[in-house]
Structures are given as C-alpha cells and as structure tokens.
Image (cartoon, rainbow, N blue to C red):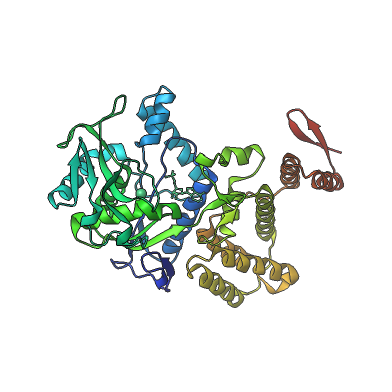
C-alpha cells in the first residue's frame, strides 16, 4: 500500500497516515444540523470528506465512515416551533433533502448516520461518567464540563490555559475562542422544548456531547480520523476531545482534519450572514450539481475558495468538455498498446492525491492527459485512456461512467443548457455565440416564456 500524507491539525504537520488497526480506518465526520437546506459551503466540506474517504478506499483500506445528524439543538427547536411542526417531522424533511443533495453530488453514503435524538440514553451515560470523574458539575438542572479540570484543554485549538475563564459558563453551543468557559453538556428543560428524563433532571443534551457519544459507540474509544469544516476546530472538536479523553483516559482521535471555508465576496458563506446558495439555487440557473463538485475539487481543501457564478460557469464548461472527451473515447475503436504511458499518468495522479488530497494537481494531471491525447491520439489506446479516467473517477466522483453515449441531439441539448446558463447570469455575448454554433449544427433556438427550445432547421 502506498503512503498517504495527511495534514493533522493536532500536530499542525503533514504526516504519513498510519491507521490504528491494520488496513481498517475509522472515520467520523460531523454532519448537518437539519433545520434547513444545506448550503454549498456545507457541501464543500462534505465533498472534501468524500474525497478523503474515496482516497483511503482507492488505496486499499476498508473505511467505516460515520456521520451524525444533529436533529436537536437550539436552531432545530426554534425553527420547528416557528413552522408549527413536531421536531421529528421537521428534521426528517431536511434530513431527506440532505441525503438527496449528497446523492446528486456523488458523495458516497456513510456506513452509519446516527441521529442525536436516538442516542440520548448513551449521552446521559457519558455525562454521568464525567460527573463521576469530577470533570463536570450540576447547576440549576443543567450539567457543565469543567474545563479547568481537564489538563489538555486547548491542545487542538492551541488555546492557552491563561485564556480560560475559570468558573464561568456558556450555554450556547456555538461560541468562539474568547469564551474559554465551561460548556454545557445537559440543558435543563425549558418551556415548549422537547425533553428527556435523566438522573440530573428533565432536559436535553448539548451539541458537543452527541459527537463524543456517537463516534465512540460506532468507532471505539480511539479511532483514526475526525473531520469537519475549520469553524468546528474550536469549540466543537476541542470539546469533543475533552469529553471523550476525560471519560475514557484514552487518546480519542489520531488525525484531525479541517476543511477551509467557501466564501462569498471574501466572507464565509453562512446562514447568519444571509449570503448562502443551495443546490436548488444552482439548479434554477441550469447548473449541474456536479459542476459544483468540480469547482470544489479545483481548490485544495485547506485553501479558502471564493464562490462566484463565473467560476461555477467555468467549472461547468470544463466538466462538459471532460464528458465530451470521455464520450468520444468510447466511440473510438483503435487498439494500440499504451499501458506504459498510462502508468506515468497514474503515478502523477496518485502522487498528487496522496499528498494531502491535492485535487487541483490531480485535475491538472487529468487535463494534461486530455491535451496529450488531443495532440497525438495515434500514440494512445482510447480504451486505456478511458479506463484510466474511470480509475481517476473513483476518487474524483465526477460521474464519467454514468455518461450515456452522446448523440448529435444530446450535444445540442448540452449547448442549449450552456446558453441558458449564460443568459441567466447575464452573459448575452456568449448566449449569442452559442446560438450561432447551434445554427451551424442545424438547430434553431426559440426563446419562450417557459425557457428555450430547439427546432431542426
Ligand atoms: P452545520 O450544519 O452548521 O453544523 O455545518 C455542517 C458542516 O459544514 C460543518 O462541517 C461546517 O464546518 C461546514 N461549513 C459551514 N459553513 C461552511 C462554509 N462556508 N464553507 C465550508 N464549510 C462550511
Ligand atoms: Zn461533531
């Protein structure tokens, strides 16, 4: 098995990945809070995690991937009440929408999607253990983690002991480094909120404790990789370490991986800033969700990526060209041996992806192959090139295998869609160019109130 290097936030270094158990990887990724549609910033993180998982599987590891679904927290309660729906009905709808989004992005299903509300007894047990060990305390029907009692608090986020505000508490699940305070494990019952009985009184779990309880249930007290977006580094992942290592005395996770954010006009895409787009917004403008996947792959997961419609359009065009290339390979019937050449491209691709998932470099290797082939196709066996494209796609997940053979009318339809997109983002020059191209192919475009249609000339 070839070495894979991954950047570990615990050491702030790229390290050779060595799993705890032979050939088996336990991977936990923090899942969505299901109170609305996931935005494409969230989805960028899930694409990064999908590439991570696919890379591990491609190189021969068996991966158990667990992703939690946060179906109870301040936001799910607030918005289900506003929608006059039960928490269950409300969160179920958005959970299903979340799964549909993952599918359209070719994100592989996790081995388990545990719901927080289905694990409350397990969470209560973990809180009891923390109380027994003197790492937590009760006050006013709630339970808090005492950060001053856990020696290594701050080891992931590099928060200094001096920054801890001993004896003060935060009740909200989301806060920043300025709050080096005791955080809530169990929230006392409030009016109109769902609640469970517990030895500490009626109430509900905080957010951080759910991930400790569920990750250890499905992957064991110590497991290999924990991933999420970089906003989770503090407090969420820091608190998970404190809860888990505090309770078991064992090292919780070997590698912490944090993906950088998707930005809009240089600010993090987030619901609270009101600058979000969902897959539905992309589809309304005639973009394929996989164009967003391509866009995400075009940046390294540890770099910020600024979202613009123009960059999405460039990604969609690149993807369409790759699809066209794969479709044309299928139609070829030559048999020249080019296995050696293929091995060189394979090696370059692997070197990129095994170096901390360098997807932009991996895409560049793929484009290099396209250009070399187009320059001198006689030197290649199209079947070998196609097979290598399929192999790359085990990691990239752009859907090359699912392509149908392209007929002339399908090509025209692809162009028509491209023209629709250009019109929707106001690029009329391009829309006119495509109209001309279609005309040359024998198609007339008619724009109607319901969209554009093609007629054979
Ligand atoms: P949430 O549903 O808010 O708990 O977030 C789900 C996942 O999306 C987490 O891993 C977050 O770190 C991640 N995330 C949130 N906003 C962004 C963003 N703008 N770019 C990338 N990832 C994000
Ligand atoms: Zn989590």
Residue 2 drawn at (x, y percent)? 43, 74
Locate residue 143: give its quadrant. top left
Give above or below for 66 relative to 94: below
The image shows residue 308 at horizontal and vertical percentages of 65, 49
Q: How many dots with numbers?
A: 0
Q: Residue at x 51, y 44 (%)?
A: 270
- Where is residue 400, by image quadrant? bottom right
Residue at x 37%, y 69% (from the top left corner): 11
| Picture layout, residue 180 above or below residue 250 | above
Residue 373 coordinates in the image, percent (x, y):
70, 69
Is residue 456 in view? yes
Which quadrant does the C terminus fall into? top right
- In this rendering, position of residue 28 left or right of residue 416: left
Asked whether, in this view, residue 415 is left or right of residue 396, the answer is right
Residue 66 visible in image = no
Quarter of the figure with the N terminus: bottom left
- Residue at the outermost left position: 132
The one of 215 and 389 positioned closer to us in this rendering: 215
Which of 196/172 is in front?
172
How far across and how far down the image is residue 13, in percent?
42, 71
């Amino acid at each position: 098995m070839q070495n894979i290097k991954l950047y570990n936030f615990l050491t702030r270094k790229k390290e050779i990945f060595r799993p705890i158990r032979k050939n088996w990887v336990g991977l936990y990724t923090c899942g969505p809070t299901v109170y609305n549609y996931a935005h494409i910033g969230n989805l960028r993180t899930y694409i990064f995690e999908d590439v991570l998982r696919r890379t591990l599987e491609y190189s021969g590891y068996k991966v158990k991937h667990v992703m939690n679904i946060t179906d109870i927290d301040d936001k799910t309660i607030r918005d289900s009440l506003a929608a006059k729906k039960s928490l269950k009905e409300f969160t179920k709808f958005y959970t299903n929408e979340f799964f549909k989004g993952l599918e359209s992005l070719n994100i592989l299903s996790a081995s388990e999607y545990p719901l927080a509300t289905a694990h409350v007894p397990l969470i209560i047990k973990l809180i009891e253990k923390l109380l027994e060990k003197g790492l937590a305390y009760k006050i006013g029907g709630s339970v808090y983690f005492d950060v001053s009692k856990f020696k290594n608090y701050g080891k992931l986020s590099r928060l200094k002991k001096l920054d801890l505000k001993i004896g003060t508490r935060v009740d909200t699940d989301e806060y920043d480094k300025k709050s080096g305070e005791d955080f809530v494990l169990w929230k006392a019952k409030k009016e109109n909120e769902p609640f469970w009985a517990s030895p500490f009184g009626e109430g509900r779990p905080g957010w951080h404790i759910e991930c400790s309880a569920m990750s250890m249930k499905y992957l064991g007290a110590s497991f290999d990789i924990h991933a999420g977006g970089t906003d989770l580094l503090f407090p969420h992942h820091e608190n998970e370490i404190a809860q888990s290592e505090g309770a078991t005395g064992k090292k919780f996770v070997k590698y912490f991986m944090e993906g950088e954010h998707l930005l809009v006009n240089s600010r993090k895409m987030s619901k609270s800033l009101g600058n979000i787009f969902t897959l539905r917004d992309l589809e309304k403008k005639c973009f394929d969700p996989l164009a967003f996947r391509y866009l995400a792959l075009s940046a390294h997961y540890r770099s910020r990526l600024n979202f613009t419609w123009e960059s999405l359009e460039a990604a969609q065009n690149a993807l369409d060209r790759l699809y066209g290339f794969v479709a044309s390979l299928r139609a070829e019937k030559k048999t020249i041996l080019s296995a050696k050449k293929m091995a060189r491209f394979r090696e370059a691709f692997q070197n990129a992806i095994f170096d901390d998932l360098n997807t932009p470099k991996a895409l560049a290797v793929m484009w290099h192959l396209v250009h070399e082939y187009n320059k001198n196709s006689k030197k290649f066996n199209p079947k070998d090139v196609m097979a290598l494209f399929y192999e790359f796609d085990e990691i990239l997940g752009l859907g090359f295998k699912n392509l149908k053979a392209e007929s002339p009318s399908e090509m025209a339809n692809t162009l028509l869609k491209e023209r629709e997109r250009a019109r929707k983002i106001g690029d009329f020059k391009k829309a006119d160019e495509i109209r001309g191209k279609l005309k040359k192919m024998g198609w007339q475009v008619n724009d109607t109130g319901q969209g554009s249609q093609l007629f054979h000339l």
